[in-house]
Amino acid sequence: MLIFEHAHPGRRAHAQAPYNAPAADDLPADMLRQTPPLLPETSELDVVRHYTGLSQKNFSIDTQFYPLGSCTMKYNPRACNSLAMLPQFLGRHPLADESTGQGFLVSMYELQEMLKEVTGMAGVSMAPMAGAHGEFAGVAMIRAYHDARGDTARREIIVPDAAHGTNPATATMCGYVVKEIPTDRQGNVDLEALKAAVGPQTAGLMLTNPSTLGVFEKTIVEIQKIVHAAGGLSYYDGANLNAILGRVRPGDMGFDVIHMNLHKTFSTPHGGGGPGAGPVGVSERLIPFLPIPYVINERDFYRWAVEADVPQSIGRMSAFGGNMGVLLRAYVYARMLGGRGMQRVAEFAALNANYLAVELKTAGFELAFPERRASHEFIVTLKKLKDETGISAMDFAKRLLDYGFHAPTTYFPMLVPECLLIEPTETESKETLDAFVQAMIAVKREAESQPDLVKTAPHKLPSRRLDDVKAARELDLVWKAA
Amino acid sequence: MPFIPHTESDIAAMLASIGASSTDALFDEIPTDLNCGGLPGIPDGLSEMHVSRLMNQRAVQDGFFSNFIGAGAYEHHIPAAVWQIVTRGEFYSAYTPYQAEASQGTLQLLYEYQTMMASLTGLDVSNASLYDGASALAEAVLMAVRANKAGCRRVLVPASVHPRYLAVTRTTVKNQNIELVSVPFDRTTGIADLAALDAVTGDFAALVIPQPNFFGALEPVDALTDWAHAHNMLAIAVVNPLALALLKPPGQWGEAGKSQGADICVGDGQPLGVPMSSGGPYFGFMTTRQSLVRQMPGRIVGRTVDLDGQPGFALTLQAREQHIRRSKATSNICTNQGLLVTAATIHMSLLGPEGLKSVALESHAKTRALLEKLLAVPGVERVFNSPFFHEAVIRVSTSVDDVLRALRAQGILGGHALGGDYPELADCILVCATETKTDEDLEHYRQQLQRILSRRNGREPGVPPCAYK
């Protein structure tokens, strides 16, 4: 039932709006709204009950194991939320003078400095509001760098075929042409293909490491040499930073620009699709192009950098400087972890991933790269199962939901047929991983013995399997009263 | 160690299964010379109690002010129920609803949100949100250019559009050979100058129409929409969603019978239940007409049926998006601002059509009352004579910076100085009062401003008024 279907004309949540607001008799009548918008007329209890009920139809980290590869669905500590929501922080106007926000700004400055240390980069801006937004900032900086040198013939961005879809989409938004290069059988970038692809037209390379295949690019140093020798810059997609936190730094690997997904590595909530935060870090030569604002420390007075401070900046990315509340949550998380805690994040993310991979392999699942060490995630391919039983990775994923586990990422990366990309994260216990293995085994048995049960899954959720084709063909995007 | 549950015996058992001697061995594919050996530059971890003390100290240091700044972020009452429900773990810690059957709560809420926003703006369809109002305008400009069949890549942006929105749009589109052409506002009215528009030559894909504009003034939206359509441009509305509870929705802009309303509507959803929070996270909204839905960026939720024929919800039109189309996607965006949209949907439900309208009316009335009080102070005058929503521009007889600083010393954030973005308005302040202000708050502002201006009069330039501490 929709909230609109709970409505009754004349019903209101009386406590929530001003009483007896005066008419706007000074405004011209032809500027005024004639018919009220379709908002529900409900009591406060109606609303609370409806949305509490809706929340109960969701899977979430707080209620289920969420081994969603590439998404780093780890526990979001509650303290991060409650401290970011202190009333003084919530009530601060973004254009209030900086002298009124030194407590907030020093926190932002310290987060900036910590992100520099974590990534080994020379400069950081936290302006981008999501990973893809950070990618945009990164590639825009690459372009600004080349343009500032008059090196305008560089029009291509090289992207491995295993990359996130945001990489090529971002390159296009920055006016670049995308050149895809293949991956070899071991899951590495094909070095020969890379050598053939680079040239005076190369603006840069975008790379995730560990890659989306869940393995570390062993030849990363050589890759950097090839790109840099051709005059290109290298971009690090920080989606998988959790795997190497405190162990390897993108700056030490030679990257020129990176983005971080704080909603992954720094455990800010995913919120059903956002908000995220995608700070960017850069090497020395890209500092003049960082997006604004970022925090400047002037003899212990903290203020935002503006256009005049960074004349070559790629510019502003949001009206007021970014997703501050998300950054505050990340700051609290970073302070609770400390340097040693961050290092242990990668250690235990790797331990959980490798343990789960071994247990699944032992249980008869086929790993996509069995001879490689898993990073913080790994890929199971169900191609054989599909060939034998007709059960696809999607069917398998839907049946896992019935067992109370969120499905792993399916059909990404696209290189591996019928794949499940599995990322347990460091915050899950051995018992949870063991229970997940048992569920995987149970679904596999069902696929072999009762394929129809799996094909028609889920059976125990608020909805049975939904018709995506109908959703796209017969668009119903807004409710209309019958 | 924070949030890692492993006991020593767990670790030993897991390493034994893997066949590794230590967790270090799990990184054996990484070249050893890349190992940074830890993060000595990052301080040691703190317990929750200690970090709580630190953050509380910093919050208290920042304190509270009586705020009269608007300029794109507005202080409104947010019902307690809104964020208590938003921060339920089932909303807070859920992922993007790719697994529709495990995400029906978020998906249904987004469908309800789309319905509310389409109705509020008077258009056919809505996406599930974008980053913020400024980035939503940037996406609207890109969308208008995509939709332009003649391949025109120029867009008209009046100077009365929020300067930061313009800056973000420029950042976003500059690498795609799209030109943003400015049109001046009328110095008397503070709104679009139709004569200046007629003087613009050449083809354009769209005209951006703010309502209210950055100065709080109400634009002649009917005439502007008709003008855009008469010149084969799309009309992009940039609106305050709260104002639409009171003002004519963009879908109905234009003289009756002449045009069919704005084509794309965007704005920032912050006034709908989102705290000011130093600037974010907020959310951008975008609605449009049905014929443009496939050009729209961002997540979109559709209603469909499940295997039993029961209604349910799923992400739809994903063929526009980066994870399918890669370099040919409508945008690289892959988030919406889910939690903020959750807040806005609950907020709009709690207020309902009447409640939202009374907040808009009360905010308008408070700004009227504030303006009346401030204009009675010697040395204060009004700058533009147009009707306004809940913001207006005043001119003061002495340095804006000094006045605002002296007001701060009295706990008042007196408004937004306009000189940074509009040098010709260097002696002007944009003021805003919402329903959160009492008559006593307004009177306090008036008294302090009067005191500051009167003491400032006759002083030598550069000597601070006595309120300046």
Image (cartoon, coloured by chain):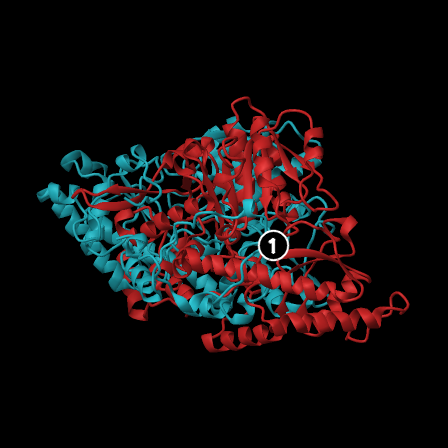
Chain colours: A cyan, B red
Chain ID at mark 1: A
Residue B80 versus residue B340 in the image, above or below:
below
Residue at 58% across, 71% down: B438
Instruction: Classify 10 Å Cα crowding around label 1: few (below 14), some (14-19), many (20 and above).
Output: few
Q: Nearer the viewer, residue B165 or A122?
A: B165
Q: Looking at the picture, how far across and down is residue A91, in whole percent? A: 56, 67
Residue A339 versus residue A441 in the image, above or below:
below
In the displayed structure image, the side of residue B422 where residue A468 appears, left or right? left
Quadrant that contains the N terminus of chain B: bottom left
Asked which quadrant contains residue A229, the reply is top right
In the displayed structure image, the side of residue B178 where residue A68 appears, left or right? left
Q: Nearer the viewer, residue A272 or A33?
A: A33
Residue at 38% across, 42% down: B300
Q: Looking at the picture, how far across and down is residue A181, in whole percent? A: 45, 30
Q: Looking at the picture, how far across and down is residue B262, in whole percent? A: 51, 37
Labels in figure, total? 1
**Is residue B170 visible to us here?**
yes
- In the rendered image, the residue lying farthest to the top is B150
Residue at 68% across, 63% down: B372
Q: Which residue is mark 1?
A: A26
Residue B220 versus residue B401 in the image, above or below:
above
**Is residue B433 visible to us here?**
no
Three-letter code, disc 1: Asp
Quadrant that contains the C terminus of chain B: bottom right
- In the rendered image, the residue lying farthest to the left is A449
Q: Secondary structure at mark 1?
A: loop
Q: Nearer the viewer, residue A387 or B118?
A: B118
